[in-house]
Image: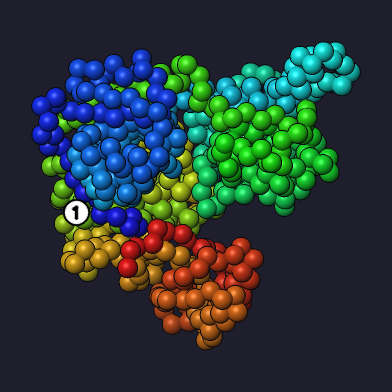
């Protein structure tokens, strides 16, 4: 669940006589700002430190940045007139989105402007790595011919593994196929049918590691993907494979990559993004010669991409200042107020239900059914359906927001069915979400009590009354004496604290579900020990955002 209250965006005009004022920091392509010329006074500055930005942001109605300028909570608190922050690029990790939401400031990005550039850079890194182009270039410029030292490998008939099959990953896969490569891919939200349409063989993460001659990464950095490619994962890769990362720094453990290169487990690595940027002079990957290709975060650095993202964000800023919706709002739904306001109290709950049910399944959801009951059946629920989709997709797909969630779902082949009933239930309003993968379906339902308190009230066929936040252990089992004690003992031995417990069952000593709210993350090996207890099956660890208390 979101830990912030979604405020209405500020749209009153500034008091100064010059109309709207827009501050543009970082190195934004000036040709992309034409959309602002007729509606605002534009000031362009180099990247600013947070303290300097906070000192000057007060009179501005809009702020446009790339990645160098950090838009912190302190900056947003000082921004008395700010209505919108635009990030000329995909990631918004340099913007405190939660603080912006609390202040009613819309945050927008350009999720598609650099798709082509990022995909082409990943392909370029792969080619440079295969043919040792960078090392050969350096040798030639140093007066060394030495062609025998730069024997490469062909891509033709090699296996290309693509981790993450969003827009960028799909484009990389298409180019790989055009080069005559066999393409395998792993993506938690791509259906096998859609993968076949793309000419990609869908495999799990372990299959991707084992089969890829070249493996390219196109997933966001999250708690689940941080150091995903650590020493253990690299040891399971195909010996002599080559690794490419033009996605996000920190997904790859750089020290582990060096060790894998030195042992010969990896034949090469090409990296455009790093845990610390700019790359420190003493980084372990510097000085590795032809085995490593390093570029300074150039994935989006083409003239065309820089112009596209600047135009995209400038147009959105102009639209918002003119009272129109933004097409790529990260934090505030761009629904009409008359549609959004009646269902706003259920928006965070709907997103949480999507996040929750998506983590109860082992593979990509291909069918999503949403039932609105009680008073909700009489209202327009499009924002709530979008919120469910956003929650379902955003924990594994980068850049999903209220605007693009339906399109992202469609691209991944998810069928969406809405239904409604005004028949009486024990709750005045109820949202029920059913997600299906293969022949397996899971159901979660929730409501909002009168004081604005959201609750999960059903998991599958079992009734609950559970706060949907933080870390939750979901443990289906056969109800027998001692079940709760055995799980509690294992968690206690691992120093995992329980602060909430719910037990739902169909009948005495029958199928049941134990739900535990815990303060700490549960390691994979501990989860496996719990799943191995007698009578337990399909144990899950669900991660939700924590509510402020």
Residue in view at x 29 percent, y 45 percent:
76
Color theme of the render: rainbow
Closest to the observer, 199 or 113: 113
Q: Is residue 123 above or below residue 377?
A: above
Image spot of residue 510 (x, y percent): 47, 77
Q: Is residue 156 visible?
A: no
Residue in view at x 84 percent, y 15 percent:
144
**Image position of 240 (left or right of 543):** right
> Which residue bears the numbered disc 1?
376
Q: Is residue 134 above or below residue 281?
A: above
Closest to the observer, 63 or 457: 63
Image spot of residue 211 (x, y percent): 73, 38
Q: Is residue 337 visible?
A: yes
Instruction: Describe the element under mark 1 as helix, strand or loop.
Output: helix
Q: Quadrant of residue 112?
A: top left
Image spot of residue 4 (x, y percent): 29, 55
Q: Quadrant of the C terminus?
A: bottom left
Q: How many marks can you see?
A: 1
Closest to the observer, 8 or 207: 8
**Image position of 246 (left or right of 470):** right
Residue in view at x 49 percent, y 76 percent:
497
Image spot of residue 48 (x, y percent): 39, 35
Residue in view at x 12 percent, y 31 percent:
16
**Image position of 248 (left or right of 88):** right
Q: Quadrant of the N terminus?
A: bottom left
Q: Quadrant of residue 491?
A: bottom right
Badge 1 crowding class, 10 Å Cα cut-off, few under 14, some 14 to 19, many 20 or more, is many
């Amino acid at each position: 669940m979101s830990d912030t209250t979604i405020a209405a965006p500020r749209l009153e005009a500034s008091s100064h006589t010059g109309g709207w004022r827009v501050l543009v920091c970082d190195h934004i392509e000036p040709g992309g700002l034409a959309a602002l010329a007729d509606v605002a006074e534009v000031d362009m500055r180099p990247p600013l430190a947070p303290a300097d930005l906070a000192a000057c942001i007060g009179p501005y109605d809009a702020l446009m940045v790339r990645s160098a300028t950090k838009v912190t909570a302190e900056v947003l608190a000082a921004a008395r007139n700010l209505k919108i922050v635009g990030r000329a690029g995909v990631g918004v990790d340099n913007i405190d989105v939660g603080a912006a939401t609390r202040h009613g400031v819309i945050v927008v990005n350009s999720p598609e402007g650099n798709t082509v550039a990022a995909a082409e850079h990943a392909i370029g890194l792969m080619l440079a790595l295969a043919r040792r182009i960078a090392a050969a270039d350096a040798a030639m410029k140093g007066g060394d011919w030495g062609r025998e030292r730069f024997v490469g490998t062909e891509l033709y008939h090699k296996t290309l593994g693509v981790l993450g099959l969003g827009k960028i990953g799909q484009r990389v896969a298409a180019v790989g196929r055009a080069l005559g490569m066999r393409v395998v891919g792993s993506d938690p939200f791509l259906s096998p049918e859609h993968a076949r349409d793309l000419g990609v063989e869908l495999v799990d993460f372990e299959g991707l590691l084992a089969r890829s001659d070249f493996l390219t990464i196109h997933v966001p950095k999250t708690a689940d993907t941080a150091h995903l490619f650590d020493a253990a994962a690299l040891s399971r890769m195909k010996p002599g494979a080559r690794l490419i990362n033009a996605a996000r720094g920190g997904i790859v453990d750089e020290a582990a990559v060096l060790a894998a290169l030195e042992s010969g487990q990896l034949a090469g690595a090409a990296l455009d993004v790093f845990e610390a940027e700019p790359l420190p002079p003493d980084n372990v990957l510097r000085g590795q010669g032809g085995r490593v290709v390093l570029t300074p975060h150039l994935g989006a650095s083409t003239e065309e991409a820089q112009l596209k993202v600047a135009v995209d964000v400038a147009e959105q800023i102009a639209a918002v200042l003119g009272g129109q919706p933004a097409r790529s709002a990260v934090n505030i739904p761009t629904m009409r107020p008359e549609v959004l306001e009646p269902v706003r109290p259920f928006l965070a709950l709907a997103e949480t239900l999507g996040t929750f049910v998506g983590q109860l399944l082992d593979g990509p959801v291909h069918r999503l059914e949403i039932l609105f009951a009680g008073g909700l059946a009489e209202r327009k629920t499009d924002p709530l359906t979008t919120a469910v989709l956003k929650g379902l997709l955003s924990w594994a797909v980068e850049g999903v927001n209220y605007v693009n969630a339906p399109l992202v779902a469609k691209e991944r082949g998810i069928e969406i069915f809405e239904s409604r009933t005004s028949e009486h239930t024990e709750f005045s309003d109820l949202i029920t979400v059913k997600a299906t993968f293969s022949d397996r379906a899971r159901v979660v339902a929730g409501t909002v009590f009168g004081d604005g308190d959201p609750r999960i009230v059903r998991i599958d066929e079992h009734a609950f009354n559970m706060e949907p936040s933080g870390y939750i252990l979901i443990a289906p089992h056969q109800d027998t004496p001692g079940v709760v004690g055995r799980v509690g003992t294992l968690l206690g031995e691992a120093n995992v604290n329980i602060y909430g417990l719910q037990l739902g069952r169909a009948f005495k000593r029958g199928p049941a579900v134990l739900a535990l709210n815990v303060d700490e993350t549960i390691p994979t090996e501990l989860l496996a020990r719990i799943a191995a207890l007698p009578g337990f099956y399909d144990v899950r660890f669900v991660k939700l955002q924590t509510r402020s208390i």
